[in-house]
Structure formats: structure tokens, C-alpha cells
Image: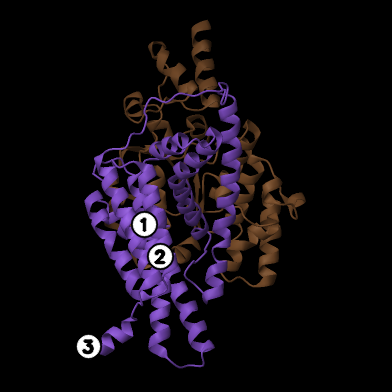
Chain colours: A purple, B brown
């Protein structure tokens, strides 16, 4: 469950933590779009690398690495399926090309996880809620969203307990072939989902008994304002998006094979 | 037989949950681990079936070092019933829930059938055989969880907070059940806050505070020692409190059960009237 560790917010102060969550979110979306429009390896490597300074600046390398490790299994799965299906589909030829294609698809997923991880690691649920409210999204939805985010660590902890409970009944998660291993997770997923639903019902009752939604108009103690750092991030975002779209439309992106080939 | 030697355990987030714990639990012993919230009780028992491995020191279960074996292998000997049954129930029917562990341990189909029937019967769940565990009440779910562990007949049975959410008659049944296990020569370890329950069972009590064992002895010695109990944020059983307050009447202090209390009081009253 270490993939969840990459989403756990810790209250520390860094230039990245202090950025406006709305701008950070737009940045993440821009990276998302940029990652989606490329299927070549080279631009995806660049997208992956340009986020590393942000991670270093926020000082969340350790947690980020943990979330990357958590995503490794899924990444391996994406790599294998893409590689096998495209390579076999093409009749066992052009190995290098399909290898590069599979690595690119995997890296796209890694870039997405990377940017979302940076966002969640450096944005407090409260800030996130404020951001949503100030974009005039109805409070019910903001609340539902922030609650969901806030419950991620709780859910991760619960998942750990459930895993322990099933291991104590002789369940071996790492045993068996691939399909069996997936099936091994059923005894963990069902209790997790059931208790999440139970918890949400309890939470709803507890909130209603504390007069949730009694007043129509809410005011906030803190209000988000755009600072200088935010403008820098806006500039970076626009730049990333502009370069990405320009490259996509007007430039031919060489594949890694071609590049290496020209050197050799 | 469980042996812990100088066991220390630190969670990945840096919390030192156990500090230099050494203890031996012999076969057939009945042990209650008590102490305030966060004292390390559950962390300690999780070391006994290998769910947690000591950061320093060793835990031996029947002579096997828990660091060198899997949880599944240890679980065959050490059954652990978790506090919240909802953390383990997932099957469509109670009987499947009970068969789950047996399948994991590779029992044969016929043996599984027999064991399931036996466990259902033992905990009075036979008429729920085909019912979904999610349809049952909290107390019943707890019993299903217990049955699912007992089915493979582990030599050591560990129960985490077994009395929480149970009404008085269920507690009484649980007590009878534990005594029955003990009579069969099983080692029973319970983790609990329930002083009155412990007073009724009279086990060996391990009192924990901040990751250390602060007292280890018979319940009638530990639970009647107010100084030690205050350290671990535990209040003595009510009957003990009365006897502690009446200590000027030359009444004995080490009283934890009602029957013995009655005997002592009657003898004092008789002595006064003559």
C-alpha cells in the first residue's frame, strides 16, 4: 500500500507547499495533457525530469520515492502488456521499436503518478477544500472531495490491518501464479470496501447530528490569494503546455533508436 | 511456548512501541495483557505470530525464530483473532468464511467440511451456516471471526479485545469458552482493558506501560496493587476497591472475585456478632 504514502500530506513549509493549490492543480493538469499527447519516449523523459526540481524544492523526495515504488507493480504490468501485445501483434519483429513504445507508455503512467504525487504531497486537504470553494463549486461537493482525500491515509491504515488479519489466517499474498495473486487480494478488498461504506454512513449520521448544512451561507477564516511564486508557476505551466503543443504540431520527434543510431 | 528475548520494536514512523521486553509464556498458560491505550499490547502480540518482527532481540515460538519463518507457517500454531471482525470477514456465507483459513493451510475437502461443522457448533452458529456474515449482528460477527480461527485448532489462541461490544451473557460464554480451551491444554493470550473480565478469569497478568512490562504475575496480585495499576491507567476491580477501602477492618487486600469476598465478609461479620 506504499502507493498511498505518496499521497499523504505532511505539514511542512517549502516554496512549493506555499503555492496556491489552484495554480498547482492547473500545473498538474498541464503535465497530464502534455503526457497524454506524446507517445514518443524522448518528450516523456523530459516531462519526467522537469518535475524533479519541484520535488527537491518541496523536500518530499523520500515520500515521493515511496509512492514511485508503490506504483512499480502497475508500471511493470503496463510495460508487459503493452510490449507483449504490440510485439506479438506485429509478428515478432522490430523489437527495439516496440520496446521503446512500451517504455514510453509506462513512463507516461509514471509521469502522471509523479505529478499527482507532488500535488497531493504538498497540498493540505484544507487548502484543497478552500481552493474548490473559491472556484464556486457547491460546498457539498467540496466537502465530499476533501473528506475523500483526508480519508486516504485512514483507508491505507485499515488496509494494512486487514492484510494482517488475513495473513494471520494463512493468506499468502505472494503465492501462486499471476491470476492467483490477483485473486489473493479479494479477501482484502471486500472488507476494505465494506468498512469504507459503513464508515461513510456513520460519518453522514454524525455530521447530520451536528447540524451539518444548517446555515446556507458559509464564511471562511482564510482566503486564498495569488502571490509572486504562483505567477512563476503559471509561467512554467504555460511554457510547458506551449512547448508541448508546438512540438506536437510542428516538430518531428526522433525516436531514441534513431538518436542512438546516428551516434553509433 | 513463546519466548521473547530483549525485544525492541520501532515502527517505520519512528515510534518506539516495545522496549526491551523479555518474557516466557509456557504451554497451557492463560495470560492477559493489559495496559493503557498505546502501551504496546497489540504490537507485542503481533510479534507472537510474526506479523511484526522485532527490530532488536528475538521471539521464539516453539523454538522457531519468528524472523526466519513466514506468518502463514506461524499462524498454523498461533491463531490470532483481531479486535474488529469487519477487518477479516469477506465471504458470502459463514461456512466459507470459516473454511478460508483451512483452504489456505491446505486441509483436505473432507476435513474442511468436518472442521467447519465442528467450529460452527462450538460457537452456536450452526443455523447461520449459509447466512452472509455481513447480515449478522456485531456480536455474532465477532463469534464468526473466532470460529474461523478455532477451525484449524491452533495450539496458541490470541484474542485482541474479545469483550468489546459483547453483552454480559456473551462475556460469560466467552469466559467459559476460554476456560474450556485452557482445560484442553491450549495457551490463551488475551489483550484487554476489561478489568472485571480479567478478575473473573484470574489469569497471569502482564501489565504494560509505554512499551515496557511493568508488572507480571497472578491477577490477584497485580490487580490489587493500586500503585502499579495507577501507573498503567487501570482502576482495580470494584470488589477490590471495596476491600482496599475497608482495609482497617483487617480484611485481606488481595481479593478480586465476588465469591471469595463474600466468604471473607461473612467470616468477619460472624466474628463480630459472637
Q: Is residue A180 above or below residue B177?
A: below
Residue depicted at x 45% and y 93%: A93
Q: Nearer the viewer, residue A97 or B93?
A: A97
- Residue B135 image offset from top left, x and y in percent: 71, 46
- Residue B112 image offset from top left, x and y in percent: 66, 66
Q: Earlier in the sequence, mark 2 or mark 1?
A: 2
Q: Is residue A59 left or right of residue B207?
A: left
In the rendered image, which quarter contains the N terminus of chain A?
bottom left
The tag on residue A35 is: 2
Q: Pick out the residue farthest to the top.
A: B273
In the rendered image, which quarter contains the C terminus of chain A?
bottom left
Q: Is residue B154 above or below residue B195?
A: below
- Mark 1, other Cα within 10 Å: few <14 / some 14–19 / many ≥20: many
Chain letter, disc 1 residue: A
Element on which disc 2 rests:
helix
- Residue B124 image offset from top left, x and y in percent: 71, 47
Element on which disc 1 rests:
helix
Q: CA distance from mark 2 to mark 1?
A: 10 Å
Q: Nearer the viewer, residue B129 or A38?
A: A38
| Marks 1 and 3 on same chain | yes
Q: Is residue A100 above or below residue A10?
A: below
Q: Earlier in the sequence, mark 2 or mark 3?
A: 2
Answer whether labels 2 and 1 touch (C-beta < 8 Å): yes
Residue depicted at x 44% and y 65%: A36
Q: How many numbered marks does the figure carry? A: 3
The tag on residue A263 is: 3
Q: Can residue B52 be seen from the camera position used here? A: no
Amino acid at each position: 500500500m506504499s502507493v498511498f504514502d505518496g499521497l499523504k500530506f505532511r505539514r511542512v513549509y517549502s516554496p512549493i507547499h506555499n503555492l496556491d493549490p489552484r495554480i498547482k492543480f492547473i500545473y498538474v493538469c498541464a503535465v497530464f495533457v502534455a503526457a497524454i499527447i506524446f507517445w514518443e519516449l524522448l518528450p516523456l523523459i523530459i516531462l519526467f525530469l522537469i518535475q524533479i526540481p519541484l520535488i527537491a524544492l518541496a523536500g518530499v523526495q523520500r515520500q515521493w520515492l515511496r509512492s514511485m515504488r508503490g506504483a512499480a507493480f502497475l508500471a511493470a504490468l503496463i510495460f508487459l502488456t503493452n510490449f507483449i501485445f504490440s510485439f506479438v501483434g506485429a509478428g515478432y519483429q522490430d523489437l527495439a521499436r516496440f520496446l521503446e513504445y512500451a517504455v514510453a507508455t509506462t513512463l507516461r503512467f509514471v509521469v502522471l503518478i509523479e505529478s499527482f504525487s507532488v500535488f497531493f504531497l504538498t497540498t493540505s486537504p484544507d487548502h484543497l477544500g478552500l481552493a474548490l470553494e473559491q472556484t464556486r463549486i457547491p460546498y457539498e461537493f467540496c466537502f465530499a472531495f476533501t473528506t475523500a482525500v483526508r480519508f486516504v491515509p485512514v483507508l491505507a491504515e485499515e488496509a494494512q490491518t486487514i492484510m494482517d488479519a488475513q495473513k494471520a489466517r494463512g493468506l499468502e499474498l505472494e503465492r501462486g501464479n499471476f491470476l492467483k495473486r490477483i485473486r489473493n487480494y479479494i479477501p482484502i478488498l471486500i472488507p476494505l470496501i465494506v468498512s469504507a461504506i459503513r464508515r461513510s454512513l456513520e460519518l453522514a449520521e454524525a455530521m447530520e447530528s451536528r447540524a451539518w448544512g444548517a446555515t446556507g451561507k458559509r464564511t471562511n477564516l482564510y482566503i486564498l490569494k495569488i502571490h509572486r511564486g504562483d505567477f512563476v508557476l503559471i509561467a512554467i505551466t504555460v511554457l510547458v503546455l506551449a512547448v508541448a503543443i508546438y512540438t506536437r504540431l510542428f516538430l518531428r520527434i526522433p525516436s531514441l533508436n534513431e538518436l542512438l543510431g546516428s551516434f553509433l | 511456548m513463546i519466548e521473547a528475548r530483549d525485544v525492541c520494536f520501532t515502527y517505520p514512523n519512528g515510534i518506539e512501541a516495545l522496549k526491551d521486553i523479555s518474557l516466557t509464556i509456557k504451554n497451557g498458560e492463560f495470560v492477559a495483557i493489559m495496559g493503557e491505550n498505546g502501551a504496546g499490547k497489540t504490537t507485542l502480540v503481533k510479534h507472537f505470530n510474526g506479523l511484526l518482527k522485532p527490530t532488536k532481540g528475538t521471539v521464539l515460538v516453539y523454538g522457531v525464530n519468528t524472523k526466519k519463518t513466514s506468518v502463514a507457517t506461524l499462524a498454523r500454531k498461533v491463531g490470532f483473532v483481531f479486535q474488529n471482525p469487519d477487518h477479516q470477514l469477506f465471504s458470502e456465507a459463514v461456512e466459507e468464511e470459516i473454511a478460508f483459513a483451512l483452504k489456505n493451510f491446505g486441509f483436505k475437502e473432507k476435513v474442511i467440511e468436518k472442521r467447519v461443522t465442528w467450529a460452527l457448533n462450538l460457537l452456536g452458529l450452526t443455523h447461520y451456516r449459509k447466512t452472509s456474515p455481513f447480515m449478522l449482528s456485531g456480536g455474532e460477527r465477532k463469534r464468526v471471526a473466532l470460529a474461523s480461527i478455532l477451525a484449524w485448532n491452533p495450539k496458541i489462541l490470541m484474542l485482541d479485545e474479545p469483550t468489546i461490544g459483547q453483552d454480559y451473557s456473551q462475556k460469560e460464554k466467552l469466559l467459559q469458552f476460554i476456560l474450556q480451551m485452557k482445560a484442553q491444554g491450549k495457551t490463551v493470550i488475551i489483550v484487554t482493558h476489561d478489568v472485571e473480565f480479567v478478575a473473573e478469569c484470574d489469569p497471569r497478568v502482564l501489565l504494560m506501560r509505554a512499551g515496557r512490562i511493568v508488572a507480571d504475575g497472578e491477577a490477584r496480585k497485580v490487580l490489587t496493587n493500586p500503585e502499579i495499576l495507577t501507573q498503567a491507567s487501570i482502576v482495580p476491580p470494584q470488589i477490590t476497591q471495596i476491600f482496599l477501602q475497608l482495609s482497617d477492618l483487617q480484611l485481606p487486600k488481595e481479593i478480586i472475585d465476588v465469591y471469595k469476598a463474600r466468604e471473607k465478609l461473612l467470616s468477619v461479620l460472624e466474628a463480630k456478632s459472637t
